[in-house]
Image (tube, rainbow, N blue to C red):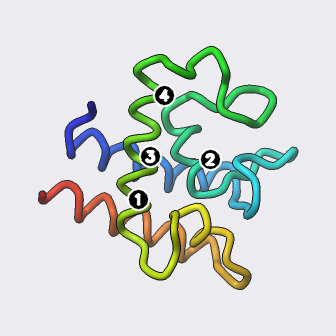
Amino acid sequence: MLSNTEVAEVLRDAVDVIDRQGWCQNELKSDDGRVCLWGAIGEAMGIIGDNNFIDPIVVGYPRYDDYTQICKITNGLVTNYSTSAQWNDKPGRTKEEVQKFLLKSADLIEVQ
């Protein structure tokens, strides 16, 4: 299990991933490399495979458990949505809103 500081670091790294690769909705990673909120977390952790899905080699591996831990934490920080992925995919959502959410989440988690 990651510490709060480590979780916050991954979330901040995810913001950088979105800056570098671009942002998308409705898929972890698009064919042109853009990522959604969860995809950015996965890329920041190095667990998105070439097939644009979570690399099956790491499923069951501790790094995958860390990934699901972070996604569950972000799920708990959104309101009116079951998951942060659904929040990301809302029509009209922007890249800037997602990056702001990631940064705010990192700040909240780090002080707990």
Q: Residue furthest left?
A: 112
**Left or right: residue 8 compared with residue 97:** left
Q: Where is 90 relative to 38, above or below? A: below
Q: Mark 1 points at which residue?
A: 74
Q: Are marks 2 and 3 in contact (CB under 8 Å)?
A: no
Mark 4 to mark 2: distance in Å?
A: 13 Å
Q: Which residue is drawn at 71% across and 85% down?
A: 92
Element type where label 3 sits in the image = helix
Q: Nearer the viewer, residue 76 or 112?
A: 76
Q: Where is 75 relative to 61, above or below? A: below
Amino acid type of disc 2?
Gly
Q: Where residue 75 appears, x then y in whole percent?
A: 43, 61
Quarter of the figure with the N terminus: top left
Q: Which residue lies furthest to the front in this view?
A: 82
Mark 4 nearby-residue class (10 Å; few <14, some 14–19, many ≥20): some
Q: Which of marks 2 and 1 is in front?
A: 1
Task: State the mark number for residue 64.
Answer: 4
Mark 4 to mark 1: distance in Å?
A: 15 Å
N-terminal of the pair, mark 2 or mark 1, is: 2
Q: Mark 2 points at which residue?
A: 39
Q: Residue at x 51, y 45 (%)?
A: 41
Mark 2 nearby-residue class (10 Å; few <14, some 14–19, many ≥20): many
Element type where label 4 sits in the image = helix
Q: Where residue 42 appears, x then y in whole percent?
A: 56, 39
Amino acid type of disc 1?
Thr
Task: State the mark number for residue 13.
Answer: 3
N-terminal of the pair, mark 2 or mark 3, is: 3
N-terminal of the pair, mark 4 or mark 2, is: 2
